[in-house]
Amino acid sequence: MRISELAARSGVSVATIKYYLRERLLAPGSLTSATQASYDESHLQRLRLIRALISSAGLSIGQTRQVLQSVDSPPESIHELLGVAAAAVSRAATDRSSHERVHELMRHWGWRVDVKDCTSHAALAEALDALEAAGFELPDGMLEDYRGHMEAIAEREVASVPTDSPESAVRFVALGTVLIEPVLLALRRMAQQEASARRFEPGR
């Protein structure tokens, strides 16, 4: 197909496709003349992944290139591949202070402590510091409850990761991380409202 058809089928403008080609996010087409190239279904699938990472997941061009490099030359394990995608879309902690207490919690929970995942460890440490700074103390056992529920959610999500191709796995993790988190927060708020009504409106 010509670039105009690729644009029509993907919903990405010709100018944007050319930009992705210049940035080497999208492989060149097969030359049919000195000024024209032909594209195929692999280009269409790649464009959909690029748009998912940039438009839906909010990644920069540089972050997208990094994720795509892992797709093109995937690491030995799917776990490492998913780690690249998750790290790219995760919010970095603004405070880079020590998060050893989070590592201690992880060891207590029986979770692995891997320094390459320390961005998320630092984010949890920052969140716990914010609770303490606000004078908000979690009730006994509540952090353990949160951990248990989130572990169950994570197990279910990871079990659903497609394994037919690196592209589909990365797309699932990147979009699942970014787009599902607001769903989780909304459901939490709705559940709080329901629990509040049950506790404080007994005649309901």
Image (cartoon, rainbow, N blue to C red):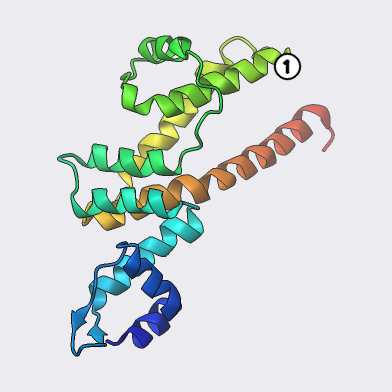
Whether residue 11 can be seen here: no
- Residue drawn 43% across and 28% down? 119
| 136 on left or right of 21 | right
Instruction: Using the rendered view, name the quadrant where residue 22 is placed.
Output: bottom left
In which quadrant is the C terminus drawn?
top right
Q: Could you say where residue 79 lies in the image, as x and y percent from the top left?
A: 25, 37
Taking depth in this image into account, of 186 and 68 the one nearest to the observer is 68
Q: SS for tag 1?
A: loop
Taking depth in this image into account, of 58 and 17 the one nearest to the observer is 17
Q: Could you say where residue 51 lies in the image, as x and y percent from the top left?
A: 43, 64
Residue found farthest to the left: 76
| 71 on left or right of 148 | left
Residue found farthest to the front: 34
Q: Can you identify the residue that label 1 sits on?
A: 134
- Residue drawn 51% across and 51% down? 179
Q: Could you say where residue 83 lies in the image, as x and y percent from the top left?
A: 32, 38
| 63 on left or right of 189 | left
Where 137 sits versus 39, above or below?
above
Q: Could you say where residue 80 lies in the image, as x and y percent from the top left?
A: 25, 37
- Residue drawn 44% across and 72% down? 16
Residue found farthest to the bottom: 33
Where 199 sits versus 16, above or below?
above
Whether residue 20 can be seen here: yes
Residue type for callout 1: Ala
In which quadrant is the N terminus drawn?
bottom left
Say few, some or many: other residues with alpha carbon within 10 Å of mark 1 (under 14 / 14 to 19 / 20 or more): few
Taking depth in this image into account, of 20 and 170 the one nearest to the observer is 20
- Residue drawn 23% across and 51% down? 163
